[in-house]
Image: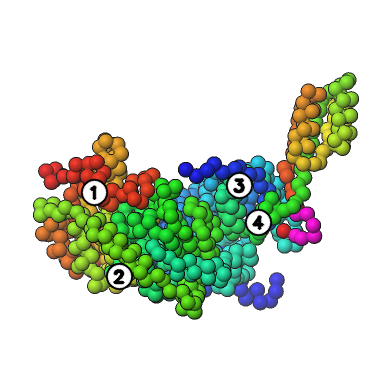
Amino acid sequence: MPPEAQGNMMSGAEMIIRALKEQGVDTIFGYPGGAVLPIYDALFKQNHIRHILVRQEGGAVHAAEGYARSTGKPGVVLVTSGPGATNAVTGLVDALMDSIPIICITGQVPTHLIGSDAFQEADTVGITRPATKHNYLVKNVADVGRVMHEAFYVATNGRPGPVVIDMPKDIQVETGPYTGSPKTKHRSYLPQVKGDINAIRQAVELIASAKRPVFYTGGGVINSGPNASQLLREFVRMTGFPITTTLMGLGSYPASDPQWLGMLGMHGTYEANLAMHDCDVMINIGARFDDRITGRLNAFSPDSRKIHVDIDRSSINKNVHVDVAIVGDAGHVLEDMIKVWKAGVHRPDKQALADWWKQIDQWRGKDCLKYEPSTDVIMPQYALQRLHALTRHLKPYITTEVGQHQMWAAQFIGFDEPNHWMTSGGLGTMGYGLPAAVGVQIAHPNALVIDVAGEASTMMNIQEFSTAVQHDAPIKVFILNNEYMGMVRQWQQISYEGRYSHSYSDSLPDFVKLAEAMHGVGLRCTKPDEVDGVIEEMMAIKRPVIVDCQVAKLENCFPMVPSGAAHNEILLNAKDAGLERADDLALV
Amino acid sequence: MRPQLPIERHTMAVLVDNEAGVLARVIGLFSGRGYNIESLTVAEVNHAEGLSRITVVTRGTPPVIEQIKAQLERLIPVHKVSDLTVEGPAVERELALVKVAATGDPRVESLRLADAFRARVLDTTTDSFTFEITGSSEKIDAFVELMKPLGLVDVSRTGVVAIKRGAGAM
């Protein structure tokens, strides 16, 4: 052993803590168990890293996702072997689909017991191989430090994603030399961040020649960091082009800006979807032509030439063939695009652009998000409009669960800054929002953090409300309670002749009492004129709150591009969908 | 509707870190994304640097082939992917062990055919031959086909290995 290594002798568990410290980790989310006791013991003996004890391992990963997405730093998770690891899997896939950097350390049975069906043994690297960007099983204590640092490198470079490190218990206990440093890279994984300058020139030329252009941007801009959002704003304003963003991209361009057309896709705005359909040049930056965006592929934006900027080579030409592909980081590519634009003689066709905006304004005139207001029942859209109006000055962090409320939140809450919107986009994980809100609140203790929720999703990870209470995370769970799995019910109404098969949320708890039973605060509103008061009361309480906002039960979320339809086959309201107005006033 | 795209056969060479689970990653990628594996071989090729080379023969439309290459390149332990069919020309070889159990005329005939195919006798008993044959997959297919009526009892094939023609490395 080289003499310098001797001073670096420590246990595997100590190496883990040291590597976390060296990586600047201040918080980890976890749940102890037999196979991680040595790491928990090392954690006990130090004061640098705060451990947030969750109530179920799935909650730990979602909390780490919320932490990561609101800070731009990787989220760290520590769970035990077997069920600890398997419970984490949903969160890992969620992070994989939404490109969120997560380091998940899982305990494993001692190496000599691996493969013997030992107590709480699971083939964690086997199970999580397709659930992660990369994973490791550490079989030698001398590898622990290097693997830890390499895992951070892999999770945060290129397209971010979750990395699992499976640590057998004997490796945590054994002593060995500490290796690696925050400068550790991976020897073969060296993602390209600078875009090819010739492709960028070609793209800028195409952009300048456009008559009906549209920017279509996604989560890649946010993942690139706040600078990329700034550059996007700069470039979009320079060109005067319209811009739409995906669900994952909300906040990368200010919602309050007149050039923004709103979100696109299945529940996107009329103007955004029609601009995508009719454009002649599409500039995709950091989005991936997801099926919820494109609708029917062979009818997707049929007459446009397409530019695609993505850090992941495999996203190019995966679903949609593009004319100019640029592999690189959104921020770097935007910077180069702006340089080329400024240096060149490229100026957009002002007349054509004016005509295009005239067309867009006509679409905007449809006022596609309008809904029928009510003075008797709380319309969910109204509740969110009020929530936005009353909280926007505080720049709240919003997480969501999955379903109608999620789409309404995307439609009705405007985001002017990146990293303030946390939602499960790719995997669509019900139960994401509550633990994610805990993670966000831990990272931003003084901020207003609201989980816009449905009652069914809330029940999926309600146990994490206890986590919020324990760790003084004053999250606000704002439930739009319509007593249905609303999106399921909506599809059943539209596509299954109203056969509401198992989509009613029966036997719901009394959410106010539930909040109180868990040592939080419960509030309720049932009439439109109570909404403002309850929101204000909620904001004033410095403890975790559940708001049971009882809304119209059968309201549907529009606009809607039905699955398998084209953008210009968008349904604007219940009548378009072949439904009578979902008039449930009598049912309340 | 999009015109029907042709299905193409491509041979790819994939240079990977020789570490536990790397083959599972490659195979999992193919099964998870619904790609087709016609043949797959793997062995360490550079012990000093711990590198293995996987040769995979796959079929798909051109966009699918492009995706397969991009997806392989995205795996963390993958150093390099060469689509030898595109980057070609390349040579491909496969080795097979073919066992024929026969006596009398069929036994003699199998030996004569083996000679014509330049297959080598690797093992023999009074009522069997095991031949070693090297060549293109088509040549091996043809040889195996001819052995069937002569008492073919067992076949073991390596799958395709391939390398670029000329002086260049992958």
Q: Describe the element under mark 3 as helix, strand or loop.
A: helix
Q: Which residue is mark 3?
A: B27
Q: Amino acid at mark 2?
A: Asp
CB under 8 Å between discs 4 and 2: no
Q: Describe the element under mark 4 as helix, strand or loop.
A: strand
Q: Which residue is mark 1?
A: A573
For residue B81, the mark is: 4
Q: Tell me where residue A455 appears, x and y as whole percent.
A: 25, 50
Label 3, label 2: how many angstroms apart (C-alpha)?
Answer: 47 Å
Outermost residue toward the bottom?
Answer: A343
**What residue lies at 30% left-to-right and 67% top-to-bottom?**
A255
Q: Which residue is mark 2?
A: A257
Q: Are marks 1 and 2 on the same chain?
A: yes
Q: Are marks 4 and 1 on the same chain?
A: no
Q: Is residue A433 left or right of residue A171?
A: left
Region of the chain picked out in magenta, as a range: B164-169
Res. B115 visible in picture? yes
**Image mark 4: chain:** B
Label 4, label 1: how many angstroms apart (C-alpha)?
Answer: 50 Å
Q: Residues within 10 Å of mark 1 (few under 14, many from 20)?
A: many
From the viewer's perspective, is the residue at label 1 or at label 3 nearer?
1
**What residue lies at 53% left-to-right and 71% top-to-bottom?**
A201
From the viewer's perspective, is the residue at label 4 or at label 2 nearer?
2
**A225 is within the stretch colored magenta:** no
Label 4, label 2: how many angstroms apart (C-alpha)?
Answer: 44 Å
**What residue lies at 75% left-to-right and 62% top-to-bottom?**
B48
